[in-house]
Image: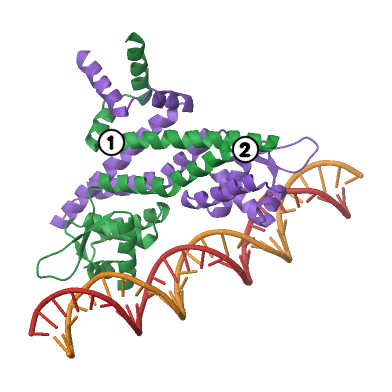
Chain colours: A purple, B green, C orange, D red
Amino acid sequence: MNLSPKIENFVLHCGEMGSRWGFNRTIGQMVGLLVINEHPLTANQIAEALKISRGNVSMGIKELQSWQLVKVHHIPGDRKEYYAPNGTIWDLANKVFEERRKREIDPTLTLLRDQILDTANTPEEKYAQEQMQSIHDLLETVTKWSAELQRLTPEQLQSLMKLGSSVSKVIDLKDKLLKKS
Amino acid sequence: MNLSPKIENFVLHCGEMGSRWGFNRTIGQMVGLLVINEHPLTANQIAEALKISRGNVSMGIKELQSWQLVKVHHIPGDRKEYYAPNGTIWDLANKVFEERRKREIDPTLTLLRDQILDTANTPEEKYAQEQMQSIHDLLETVTKWSAELQRLTPEQLQSLMKLGSSVSKVIDLKDKLLKKS
DNA sequence: CTAAACGTTCAGTAATTATTGAAAGTTAAA
DNA sequence: TTTAACTTTCAATAATTACTGAACGTTTAG
């Protein structure tokens, strides 16, 4: 398991990105490695390629499974587990979004709702609640939108983009149609 | 500068979120504190409220300024600097997105483009390039979309959401209109 | 000019997070 | 049942990241 410079470069970059997207560097590299390889890899191959311990691979895989990002393959007559990405690039990105929504946005929305419902005792609390309401509305809007986008196939999205239409134009169209009907 | 339990709760939560959004916990708390307070705060007030050192506040403010998230106020006859959020909640969110795009997405796109243009020497590299192409397309699509969304006011977005229309319906409409014309 | 009031920097240290590797767990072939 | 081939776990430790506080810089009032 020796990586070509090109592929190594990509894998290292995935590591840097991974640490900004909710994983650590090593786990980012693992995803990169799995994505870039056409065939599933064993834990030992991963350890060798990334020069990390076998135990670390095991923990990384566990973490990735909690994000639903990898799936396990088996080869008849072979007891090793072979790991591969759980879906297309698009699927993986969706899963990360979805999981982060669950872990970060949803608890925040709950907290904000609780605070907003509580009565404000002072002018400071009044202002605080208004701000929390803004954050709440923003998060709700963004999550609803991303849910909408996730429903589309990448092809749908791209064909829309390629039409060169801006979303605001589409919204205008929508508004016009609604007024007519 | 003593925080009410309600507000402290919010600020602590911002700390947790901050560490998942590209800052550290303390900086997240600083943003929370500034956002929740109607009036700008001095560095000492921030240090006292969050129970951190004066030096740490200075570093945090510097970091937040590099993200364009705070602005400085001055009161005539007062040498202290007063810090406040640089815009509405919506503005702040946009700035974070924008900054992360610059720092993370753009360099990734550059790397991917370089690799894709390079000639593939082996079948593995061929497959690797295909995957990189997918990632490239995904990132481009997502950034273009988020740019579109950023152009809209929160009101526009929310009114659209409240119509109960899914984006795919809007796309269908768009397609129909294009065929007719 | 001096002192007071503020902001910044950064070396040292504390806190947190990631990794290793040895031990224990699991499975299945012989 | 034993053994070999694999995976998992986790305490110890390494690596990274964040924080403090003292020293220094700057500005202005007296």
- Residues marked 2 and 1 touching at CB (< 8 Å): no
Which chain is home to disc 2?
B
Which x, y percent locates residue A159? 43, 23
The structure residue drawn at horizontal position 26% and vertical position 44%, both measured from the top left corner, is B90
Chain of residue at mark 1 = B
Quadrant location of the N terminus of chain B in the rendered image: bottom left
Q: What element carries label 1?
A: helix
Q: Which label is found at residue A102? A: none
The quadrant in which the C terminus of chain B is found is top left
Q: Is mark 2 on a helix, strand or loop?
A: helix
Q: What residue type is labelled 1?
A: Arg
Identified by mark 2, the residue type is Ala
Q: Position of residue A34 (x, y in %)?
A: 63, 42
Asked whether the residues under marks 2 and 1 belong to the same chain, the reply is yes
Disc 1 target residue:
B151
Q: Tell me which corner region of the image, top left, top right, bottom left or bottom right, holds residue B130.
A: top right
What residue did someone put label 2 on? B128
